[in-house]
Image (spheres, grey):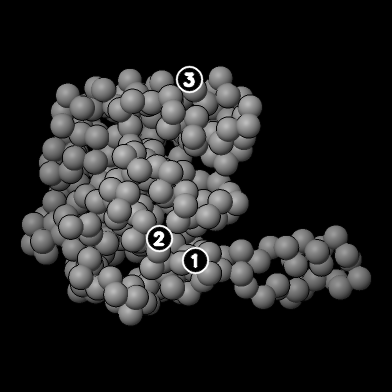
Amino acid sequence: MAKIGVQMMMLREVAAKEGVYNTLKKLHDLGFSCVEVSQIPMTPENVAEIKKASEEFNIEIATLSASVEPMAPGMESLSTHFDKIVADCKMLNCNFLRIGILPFKYLGSMEKSISFAKLCDEYATKLEEHGIKLYYHNHHSEFIKYNGKYLLDLLRDNTEKIGFEIDVFWVQRGGENPVEFIKSYKGKLELLHLKDYKIVEPNFEGIDMTNMPAVFKAFENVVHFAEVGEGSLDFVNIIKAGIETGAKYLFIEQDDTYGKDPFECLALSKANLVKLGFGDLI
């Protein structure tokens, strides 16, 4: 059965202040038993705390994260820390590893996109030897078209080994119907990100209303990340399509909580998912 869990990137500030162990305990207390780890520094201390919490609270560490190449100084990546990343996966009994974002140097042409796809396949082949499967997570930039084809589809069609983690917010932002797009990745999709897409009131505070460029910039800046069920996305059919397509893990994620306690946001997402009939997956 598919499981609904939490993407821990939305708890990175909590983890930095209170520790990873206490953060995972709070998730357990909210009723979650599955996480994807991202934007949590994988120091020996944090890895040990993750392991301890996962064992004590019966929390599955379903997915870890890694970039293909460093995108910032000191950042772990498959090109620089391959053995360490594999060791972390083994330590945490995790068989899924996901690439969170496309390195920006691979934007710009179909040829660059395909070269990145081939590089991903090379690492996927190496990881497969260790029993680990590699996945790719999309944002909106993968809906740039080269020669009439989405960048994301170029990655799909030029890889053999990697799977995909489809983020429904970014699919919507890219101009596609999340339900139908999920279906088009049947056989390639095993991970799904659940985050809602919300249009909010324009914020004109502090803006000179005679400055029309500034007024219209505020008028257009109205898309927010939202708790599941608090925006415009059709999560009943998104989740059904995801499971029918092969999703094993569905992670609640909210890139920005706009000053709200992230645990309150998670509690609201969970309550809405229960109302929608998916409580048995949590």
**Residue 233's disc number:** 1
Secondary structure of the residue carrying numbered label 2: helix
Q: How many marks?
A: 3
Which image quadrant is residue 6 in? bottom left
- In the rendered structure, which disc, 1 or 3, sits on the residue that comes first in sequence? 3
Residue that mark 3 sits on: 115
Residue under label 2, please give it: 238
Q: Which residue is situated farthest in the left direction here? A: 56
Q: Pick whichever, 116 or 182, lies toward us.
A: 182
Callout in the foreground (1, 3): 1
In the rendering, which numbered label is found on residue 213?
none
Residue drawn at (19%, 47%), measured in percent from left and top?
Answer: 47
How many angstroms separate mark 3 from mark 2 (CA)? Answer: 31 Å
Q: In the image, what residue type sits under mark 1?
A: Leu
Residue 103 appearing in the image? no
Is 5 rendered above or below residue 47? below
Mark pair 1, 2: CA separation: 8 Å
- Quadrant of image for the C terminus: bottom left
